């Protein structure tokens, strides 16, 4: 006879596993997942435990994807009407569904899920889990250009993570807050936050490299392309960054900084790696960005530029459209093509107007 493990004991072990995931404790999380899998294989049918397991497994896969680029393609497989699901599990379902939409760049859909999760947040009795909710809700609002809403959530997350001594997560909040200051035309404040965070984040190579990348983006926004180049190259020196989706993004950023300095040959090398990375990670934004660079800096083909902008429009990425259109307008003007320059300035202006509108459908 096979010895079965009681569902409540498996549930407790899943809670322990979940705590390791929230705290980004990679190795203990991997070990606990194996232990839970062994125990759950002998458990009698229990819909509630299986629903909980499925949700936590998805969050585990998100954590693992940071360390193993070959495990970056994952999906959430759970029906919303899971039987006997209690309020905590219902919260977790909406939250994890929102995370799934976020990592697949469906930001408007993600914010809907987070809204539903927030209505059930009172059933969460774990500060770290609450802080993670604030972090992701801040992130998705940041991507939707709702900067004041994003900063409110991000500051709440930062306070809790700091109190819990979750340094890596605290720094992640600071990176986003710095980005918000940059988008609100206060890059000096953003840079100060990043430089302060850099001093204490060296033990955490993942966030340390993200700070370097953020500093590069800060300098690039000021058109200080030589300083941006230095920061991007420093970030790519770290394997923990280079061999991830963020590394592919940084290669794109570096190629763009190099093209803008006239370092065409070196820029082309990094661009090719960025293009491969964007395809590998199925990243819609950076696939479009690579097409844009190909049209603007490599082939002098503005049809590719237009196609890139159209791809971003389909994803609702208005800020990104404005950013690229402004660059296309600048390059066109420098080349003496005032007609094209005016066209892209109008596109940038319209995108800036749209980026501050969420729409009623996002508050369902």
Image (cartoon, rainbow, N blue to C red):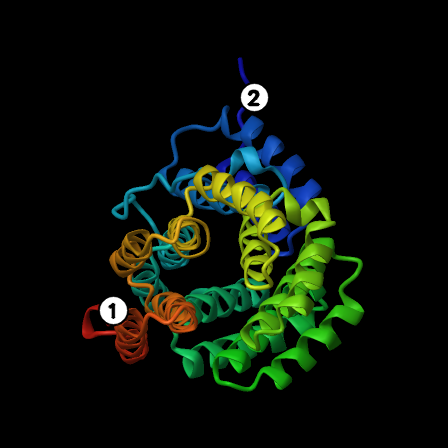
* Residue 63 can be seen in this image: no
Instruction: Identify which residue, 119 or 138, lies in the foreground.
Output: 138
Residue at position x 32%, y 51% in the image: 304
Front of the two marks 1 and 2: 1
Numbered circles on residues, count: 2
Identify the residue under disc 2: 3
Instruction: Identify which residue, 38 or 260, lies in the foreground.
Output: 260
The percent position of residue 4, horizontal first and vertical second, equals 53, 25
Residue at position x 69%, y 81% in the image: 192
The percent position of residue 179, horizontal first and vertical second, equals 54, 74
Instruction: Identify which residue, 322 or 18, lies in the foreground.
Output: 322
**Label 1 crowd bin: few (<14), some (14–19), many (20+), radius 10 Å:** some
The percent position of residue 168, horizontal first and vertical second, equals 68, 62
Can you tell which quarter of the image residue 111 is in?
bottom left
| Secondary structure state at the residue bearing disc 2 | loop
- Residue farthest front in this picture: 336
Q: Are marks 1 and 2 in contact (CB under 8 Å)?
A: no
Q: Is residue 294 left or right of residue 268?
A: left
Residue at position x 33%, y 41% in the image: 78
Q: Is residue 70 left or right of residue 310?
A: right
| Secondary structure state at the residue bearing disc 1 | helix
**Label 2 crowd bin: few (<14), some (14–19), many (20+), radius 10 Å:** few
Instruction: Identify which residue, 37 or 58, lies in the foreground.
Output: 58
Residue at position x 29%, y 44% in the image: 82
């Amino acid at each position: 006879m096979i010895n079965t493990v009681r569902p409540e004991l498996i549930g407790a072990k899943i809670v322990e596993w979940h705590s390791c995931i929230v705290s980004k404790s990679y190795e203990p999380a991997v070990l606990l997942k194996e232990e839970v899998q062994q125990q759950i294989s002998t458990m009698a049918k229990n819909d509630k435990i299986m629903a909980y397991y499925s949700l936590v497994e998805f969050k585990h896969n998100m954590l693992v994807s940071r360390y193993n680029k070959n495990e970056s393609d994952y999906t959430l497989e759970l029906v919303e009407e899971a039987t006997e699901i209690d309020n905590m599990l219902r919260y977790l379902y909406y939250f994890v569904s929102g995370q799934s939409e976020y990592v697949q760049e469906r930001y408007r859909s993600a914010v809907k899920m987070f809204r539903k999760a927030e209505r059930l947040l009172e059933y969460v009795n774990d500060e770290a889990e609450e802080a993670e909710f604030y972090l992701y809700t801040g992130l998705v609002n940041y991507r939707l250009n709702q900067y004041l809403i994003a900063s409110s959530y991000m500051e709440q997350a930062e306070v809790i993570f700091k109190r819990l001594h979750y340094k890596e997560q605290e720094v992640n909040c600071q990176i986003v807050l710095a980005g918000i200051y940059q988008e609100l035309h206060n890059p000096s404040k953003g840079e100060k936050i990043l430089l302060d965070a850099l001093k204490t984040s060296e033990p955490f190579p993942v966030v340390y490299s993200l700070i370097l990348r953020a500093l590069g983006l800060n300098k690039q926004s000021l058109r200080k392309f030589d300083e941006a180049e230095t920061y991007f190259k420093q970030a790519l020196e770290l394997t923990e960054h280079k061999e991830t989706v963020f590394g592919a993004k940084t290669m794109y950023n570096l190629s763009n900084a190099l093209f803008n300095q006239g370092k065409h040959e070196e820029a082309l090398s990094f661009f090719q790696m960025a293009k491969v990375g964007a395809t590998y990670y199925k990243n819609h934004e950076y696939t479009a960005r690579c097409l844009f660079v190909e049209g603007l800096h490599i082939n002098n083909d503005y049809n590719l530029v237009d196609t890139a902008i159209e791809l971003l429009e389909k994803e609702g990425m208005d800020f990104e459209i404005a950013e690229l259109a402004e660059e296309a307008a600048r390059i066109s003007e420098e080349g003496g093509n005032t007609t094209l320059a005016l066209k892209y300035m109008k596109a940038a202006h319209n995108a800036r107007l749209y980026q501050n509108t969420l729409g009623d459908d996002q508050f369902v």
